[in-house]
Amino acid sequence: PDKDYTRRHDPEERQVLLAMTEPETEPTEPPKLGYCYPETDESTLILDEQIDCSLVMLTDVDNAKVLAVKGTPDQRIYPASMTKLMTLIVAIEHIEDLDATFTMTDELINSLREQQASMAGFEIGEEVTMKDLLYGAALPSGADGTSGLAISIAGSESAFVDMMNEKVEELGLKNTHFMNASGLHDPAHYSTMEDITVILEYCLQNDLCKEIISTYQYTTRATEQHPHGIELTSTMFNRMYGTEVEGITILGGKTGYTDEAGQCLVSYAETEDEHRYIAVTAQGTNKWYNVYDSFKLYGVVTGTYSLDTKPAHT
């Protein structure tokens, strides 16, 4: 017999051939999500007095490279309402029906009012859809939205926060820990500019999450408490158009503020050839500094916005 016949019928050779042709078995554990941290190198622009915020970072997402930075990418920050990006994506990944409703309780609303949390405007007894809770959490940065999502999905906010921290581990974030779903200040609630960048990049992979954080205005469905719905407006887009920097468009993002965190903003933008960038600004002392510093960062990409530009608003 010829050699090929012998190989095909020899028991040992057959096992080798089968091993070469059989499909690989599925791994017993799911692989880690493949998000790599943006890296700095000798070409990274180091910023200082040109920038008003204490910490900023600009990332070329498609090349995983830090283009400009003030401070260090891994320096710990309080994320304030930038936290809600993680709240959104964890909620979206667990919501089965966007039209399912949650009834706002007096305990929930009154507790948030006592904490002076930012609110979307849902009322006690109002039946709010999951979709409206998502937009209420994201656009006006409503803690009533985040609390409603957390309780609906996990039974309590603390249980939902456990899910958020599990996602931190799943994403391989290096220096992030959450204590609540809204971003209210807690010394043990922290992140970094590089971690926030990875969180936003992950959020943008989900179509619904991307749509929500890229929306300027949204009206909730009519309810007994709000017969015409609630008109929700993005806290980011009510301070910018997104087209201020020639050659690049800011498409979406999330603001944040507490006394301890200062004014924060994480946003994403694309050039005309659809190259993607993410800018993070933190510890601003004026609600316009985080916006104008973002313009300056994106101007590093295009060369069309001077680092010497001063905010038109004070």
Image (cartoon, rainbow, N blue to C red):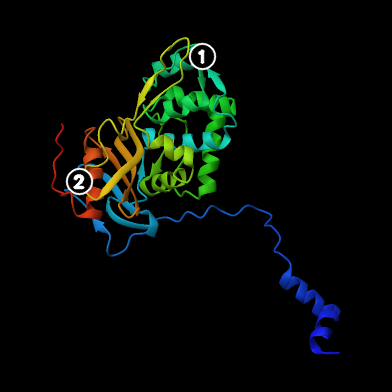
User: Mark 1 belongs to which amino acid?
Assistant: Thr
User: What x and y, as percent, mark residue 54?
Assistant: 25, 43
Residue under label 2: 51
The residue located at (40%, 28%) in the rendering is: 184
Which mark is on residue 105?
Answer: 1
Quarter of image, res 12: bottom right
Which quarter shows the N terminus? bottom right
- Residue 189 visible in rendering: no
Camera-nearest residue between 194 and 302: 302
Quarter of image, res 156: top right
- Residue 57 visible in rendering: yes
Camera-nearest residue between 46 and 141: 141
Mark 2 or mark 1, earlier in chain:
2
Left or right: residue 281 compared with residue 170: left
The residue located at (32%, 45%) in the rendering is: 280
Left or right: residue 154 compared with residue 189: right
Mark 2 lies on a secondary structure that is loop
The residue located at (51%, 48%) in the rendering is: 171
Left or right: residue 86 compared with residue 42: right
Which quarter shows the C terminus? top left
User: What x and y, as percent, mark residue 288?
Assistant: 22, 35
User: Mark 2 belongs to which amino acid?
Assistant: Ile
User: What x and y, as percent, mark residue 37?
Assistant: 42, 55
Asked whether the residues under the numbered discs 2 and 1 touch, taking CB atoms below 8 Å apart as contact, a structural biologist would say: no
Above/below status of 1 relative to 242: below
